[in-house]
Amino acid sequence: MSKKLSTAAIVAGAVAMAVTGIQTTAASAADMEKCYGVSLAGKNDCKAGAGTTCAGTSKVNYQGNAWTLVPKGSCAGLAWDKVLPDGRKGSLAELKRDNPKS
């Protein structure tokens, strides 16, 4: 499997897990965490900076002020090293990188 296809599969899996996480019960939601800077453009779960309305409103890939729900403990973990370019990782706090100009 090519690196590009592998990366796409990992991102698709993460997005699918995040969407599933939104539809879970409160007990399951406790097992998830907001991870900033890992969403693809238009695929975030919420918060995408000023002038946006919420889910699906991120403008660029890996936008630092947009988050996606991921399994607790995986946001800044090793799994994201394979997803983000240049070795960047997700963050539990809003990031100042890759934010579109207002």
Image (cartoon, rainbow, N blue to C red):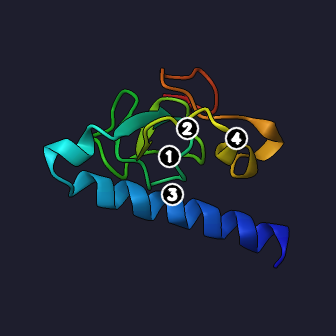
Q: Where is residue 86 in the image (x, y as percent from the top left)?
A: 82, 40
Q: How far apart are marks 4 and 3 (CA)?
A: 14 Å
Q: Distance between the residues labelled 3 and 2?
A: 16 Å
Badge 3 vs badge 2, beta-carbon distance below 8 Å = no
* Left or right placement of residue 18 versus residue 79 in this view: left
Q: Position of residue 15 (x, y in %)?
A: 46, 59
Q: Position of residue 22 (x, y in %)?
A: 25, 52
Q: Where is residue 48 in the image (x, y as percent from the top left)?
A: 40, 35
Amino acid type shown at disc 4: Leu
SS of the residue at dot 1? loop
- Which marked residue is nearer to the observer: mark 3 or mark 2? 3
Amino acid type shown at disc 2: Gln
Residue 59's disc is: 1
Residue 91 lies in what quarter of the image? Answer: top right
Count of numbered circles on the image = 4
Which residue has dot 4 on it? Answer: 78
Which circle's residue, 3 or 2, is located before the other in the chain? Answer: 3
Residue 43 lies in what quarter of the image? Answer: bottom left
Which circle's residue, 4 or 3, is located before the other in the chain? Answer: 3
Say which of 51 and 83 sits in front. 83
- Which marked residue is nearer to the observer: mark 3 or mark 1? 3
Which residue has dot 2 on it? Answer: 63
Q: Distance between the residues labelled 3 and 1?
A: 18 Å
Circle 1: is it few (<14), some (14-19), or many (20+) Cα within 10 Å? many
Badge 1 vs badge 4, beta-carbon distance below 8 Å = no
- Which marked residue is nearer to the observer: mark 4 or mark 3? 4
Which residue has dot 3 on it? Answer: 14
SS of the residue at dot 2? loop
Badge 3 vs badge 1, beta-carbon distance below 8 Å = no
